């Protein structure tokens, strides 16, 4: 078990390279620290251990005046060198052991990265242009539903291509490394139905819920925290049907509730890797069954590989429409494919 934890923290350190010096350093140290590994081992099965540990510490730090805050760019413009952060981190973890255990039991790693709309938006605009009818967006693992507001945000691609959809403050920036984006991006899709299913939907109107999402964001990522707050203001004013429970089990009933005048688009990002393989296969089977009555789109990644997929299902057959190389985990860049 300890060897497995060590490997997971070393892998997380690689994910943090050039993105979070603090978490990169702490991860490499935790991979060698038995005491901290013993704490991390209490994270429930199925949850990403490093993410949960760091988010829980971050969350508690938001309400405590502790020396450890001096190493977090979240709390200071002049953080102390990360190389000196292990001891205060370890002391904080041990001092707050009971509170951390409570968070491990009651919280889930539900990072809701609104910037991922940057690569979903072109897909949805193209679907809307092709089908010529309003979209019904159904998101599996929706968390707080930020991506369900995809049509309500503005976009800036490659620092030169502006998409101004609304007077809302949020402008999502990202770099497209692939083929030119479709012209459809300049016509926002009409979205009539928004359904977000999750084992534990997050209500952003509750302060501590928003605080948890902020804690999941890495300390150096100020722009992500800013976008989260701005997206929350947008989503709180949208009509979204949040559904608590197993999205795959409820999928057929949810699709049946959607008007025939709408084009169903089932989507999910960075969620399927946490779903058991047999349930992932069940998802595909159910989508095929639904498509025998009405065609639908399935847009996703991390189902059976890390690529971004856009499938069109009709008459029980999956038609692969687009496969894009894996995008940056926080959607700072992606590679569009015609």
Image (cartoon, rainbow, N blue to C red):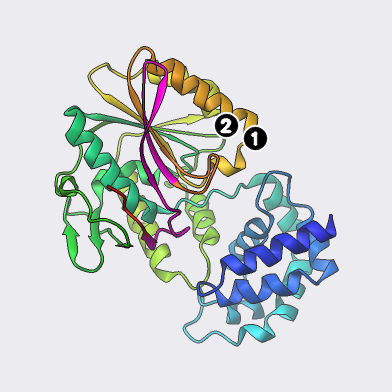
Q: Residues within 10 Å of mark 1 (few under 14, many from 20)?
A: few
Callout 2 touching callout 1 (CB < 8 Å): yes
Q: Residue at x 41, y 21 (%)?
A: 317
Q: Residue 332: say if magenta.
A: yes
Where disc 2 sits, the SS reads helix
Magenta stretch holds residue 328: yes
Work out whether residue 115 or residue 243 is closer to the camera in this orientation and state it.
Answer: 115
The residue singled out by tag 2 in the image is 280
| Corner quadrant of residue 187 | top left
* Mark 2 crowd level (few <14, some 14–19, many ≥20, 10 Å Cα): some
Residue 106 visible to the viewer: yes
Is 320 or 160 nearer to us in this picture? 320
Q: Which residue does the numbered mark 1 point to in the structure image?
A: 276
What kind of element bears circle 1?
loop
Q: Residue at x 39, y 13 (%)?
A: 292
Q: Residue furthest top?
A: 293
Residue 45 is left or right of residue 275, and the answer is right
Residue in view at x 45 percent, y 20 percent: 288
- Magenta region: which residues? 308-333
- Image quadrant of residue 334? bottom left
Residue 158 as seen in the image, left or right of residue 102: left
Magenta stretch: helix, strand or loop mostly: strand
């Amino acid at each position: 078990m300890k060897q497995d934890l060590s490997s997971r923290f070393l892998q997380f350190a690689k994910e943090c390279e050039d993105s979070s010096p603090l978490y990169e350093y702490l991860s490499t140290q935790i991979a060698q620290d038995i005491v901290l590994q013993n704490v991390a081992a209490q994270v429930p099965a199925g949850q990403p251990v490093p993410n949960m540990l760091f988010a829980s510490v971050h969350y508690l730090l938001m309400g405590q005046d502790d020396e450890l805050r001096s190493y977090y760019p979240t709390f200071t413009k002049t953080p102390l060198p990360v190389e000196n952060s292990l001891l205060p981190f370890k002391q904080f973890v041990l001092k707050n052991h009971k509170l951390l255990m409570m968070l491990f039991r009651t919280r889930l790693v539900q990072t809701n990265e609104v910037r991922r709309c940057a690569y979903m938006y072109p897909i949805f605009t193209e679907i809307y242009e092709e089908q010529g009818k309003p979209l019904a967006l159904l998101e599996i693992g929706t968390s707080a539903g930020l991506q369900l507001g995809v049509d309500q945000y503005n976009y800036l691609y490659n620092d030169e291509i502006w998409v101004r959809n609304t007077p809302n403050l949020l402008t999502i920036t990202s770099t497209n490394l692939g083929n030119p984006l479709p012209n459809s991006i300049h016509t926002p899709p009409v979205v009539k139905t928004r359904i977000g299913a999750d084992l534990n939907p997050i209500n952003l109107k509750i302060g501590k819920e928003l605080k948890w999402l902020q804690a999941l964001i890495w300390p150096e990522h100020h722009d992500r925290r800013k976008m989260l707050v701005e997206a929350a203001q947008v989503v709180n004013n949208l009509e979204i049907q949040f559904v608590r429970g197993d999205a795959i089990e409820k999928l057929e009933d949810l699709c049946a509730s959607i008007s025939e005048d709408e084009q169903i688009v089932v989507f999910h990002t960075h969620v399927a890797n946490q779903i058991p393989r047999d349930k992932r296969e069940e998802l595909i089977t159910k989508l095929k069954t639904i498509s025998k009555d009405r065609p639908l789109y399935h847009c996703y990644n991390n189902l059976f590989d890390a690529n971004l997929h856009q499938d069109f299902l009709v008459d029980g057959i999956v038609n692969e429409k687009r496969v894009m190389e894996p995008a940056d985990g926080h959607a700072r860049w992606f590679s569009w494919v015609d």
